[in-house]
Image (tube, helix red, strand yellow):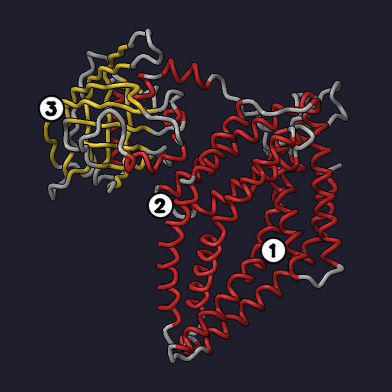
Amino acid sequence: MAVEHLEIERKYDVEEAFGLPELTGLPGVAEVRGPVEHLLEAAYYDTADLRLARARVTLRRRTGGTDAGWHVKLPAVAGSRRELHSPAGRAAKTPPKAVLEPVLGIVRRAPATQVASLRTRRLVTELVDAEGRVLAEVADDHVTGTALPAEPGDAAVVTTWREVEVELVDGDEELLASVAERLLDAGARPATAASKLGRVLADRLGALTGPSTAFPAAEPATGKKAKKGKKDKGKKQKGERGRTSSAPAGEVVRAALDLQVQALQDADLMVRTGQPDGVHQVRVACRRLRSTLAAFRPVLDRTQTDPLRQELAEVGSALSPARDAEVALAHLRALVDEQPPELVIGPVAARLQQAAIKDEQAGDAGARKVLSSPAYLQLRDDLEGLVAEPPLTEDAARPADEVLREVLARTARRLRRSVEAAQDSDDPEALHDVRKAAKRLRYTADAAVPVLGRPVAELVSALKGVQTVLGDRQDTFVTRPLCREMGLQAAAAGENAWTWGRLHALEEARSDQAEREFWLRWPGLRPVLKAATA
């Protein structure tokens, strides 16, 4: 089983003649130990198209040093990286299935083989406090990296360099900053490569990724009035409408799909590594992709995209029970905590806690099963292919602003029709249809903001509020049956079920309040909708 480690480090490029500065007198440091020499060898694994490296993930098998074994380093977040450690075992040619499992959504069915090797002569200096705790390690590395041939007949490429890594152990950011100041004063420079592997494979990565395809975003409003000259008097300022782009619509849609497929990959990684909210983010990514493929049918050949929409819907549906139960139980536990103690009769909180633990275990196993199925892995391959070569129609060559306004207007009409239907209906599902239409419009508007600017950004903000209100209402369609079910279980066990009835009533009131709030919000949303689709 993998052991998780949170890595907080900073890297610096140094010349061969660099001298490590004096590290005494730093905040909290009572002793400087070392240096101690380690000889490290690491084999790095990836697919032929370097999917892991492009996703900012490294997979290696290291020998030597204090942490020999398999390491999976995940993308950095807020200056730190999660690292999963597993025993080295006997496998060396290919990573074991258990090691690959956390990154299966990136690798999918492509074989992972060795793409590079690193040999490092490391001199480790420890910074220790008065109680003997190691606060940080300063590693002075002399590295020889070898990029293995990508194709038969190619030559291996060898690179050598020296760098210094500073990793926190029990220290804090103040110490990290102080060490950095000493190193920079001594001639070190912030590293140009995010990782050793990135430096070794730089040429191959550059050839595979090329320049960014992301479409430039509209300039955000700064609150300052732009100066108008005589020539542009009366013209709309850039921040007023955003970028009115004549770029092809297909380019904008492709950029939006690229970001959304990346979001699905990131969410997939969250689920496989046990991160909170992972299942929810996978469902959101699936919904965004479905909405984008539906809304941009004029630009994309629907005979090729409709099957993908159906497969995305199936993934979302398969994950729904786990997510719905998670949200419902979390809400009810918070609701019970808010109640006066005298109104919580019986082991209500304990029942909810047990149900949450049981549901978490079942939901985690169920989600991993869905995300490891052949159908899902094929869908991920198909989505990557969609981004690489989108099935564009003739309309894809039209100016993006024209097409986006038409798409937004059509999606907005869908929302208006849903609201009109809900006004004349007693069907509880009618407002759920409004919520789904609002989601589609919001996701479509998100893709249009970089081109159409502020009015559409304001629409996105307004729609978020609508989604929240109607989402609260929809959640009660899960919490209310759950209250009834758990109340019956409590009664069957001889417990007083009065509190469960109270919780049910509170949830019913929450649903009614959400409905009222939506109808109060709708008149204010209409002018925002009109301005964004004008």
Question: What residue sits 30% from the left and 16% below the top?
Answer: 146
User: Going by the image, does 509 lie left or right of 369?
Assistant: right
**Mark 2: few/some/many CA within 10 Å (<14, 14-19, 20+):** few
Q: Secondary structure at mark 1?
A: helix
Residue 522 percent coordinates (x, y)? 80, 61
Residue 459 percent coordinates (x, y)? 75, 48
Q: Earlier in the sequence, mark 1 or mark 2?
A: 2
> In the drawing, what numbered circle is on residue 235?
none
Q: Gap in Å between the C-alphas at discs 1 and 2? A: 29 Å
Q: Gap in Å between the C-alphas at discs 3 and 1? A: 61 Å
Amino acid at dot 2:
Gly
Residue 165, quarter of picture: top left
Q: Nearer the viewer, mark 3 or mark 1?
A: 1
Q: Secondary structure at mark 3?
A: strand
Give the labeled residue for mark 2.
274
The vertical placement of 124 against 407, above or below, is: above
Give the labeled residue for mark 1.
470
Question: What residue sits 69% from the left and 42% below the top?
Answer: 446
Q: Secondary structure at mark 2?
A: loop
The vertical placement of 42 against 281, above or below, is: above
Give the labeled residue for mark 3.
37
Amino acid at dot 3:
Glu
**Residue positioned most to the front:** 374
Front-most of 78 and 259? 259
Q: Earlier in the sequence, mark 2 or mark 3?
A: 3
Residue 216 percent coordinates (x, y)? 65, 28
Looking at the figure, which quarter contains the C terminus?
top right
- Look at the numbered discs 2 and 3 and tell me whether their residues touch, using CB distance below 8 Å: no
Q: Gap in Å between the C-alphas at discs 2 and 3? A: 35 Å
Front-most of 324 and 451? 324
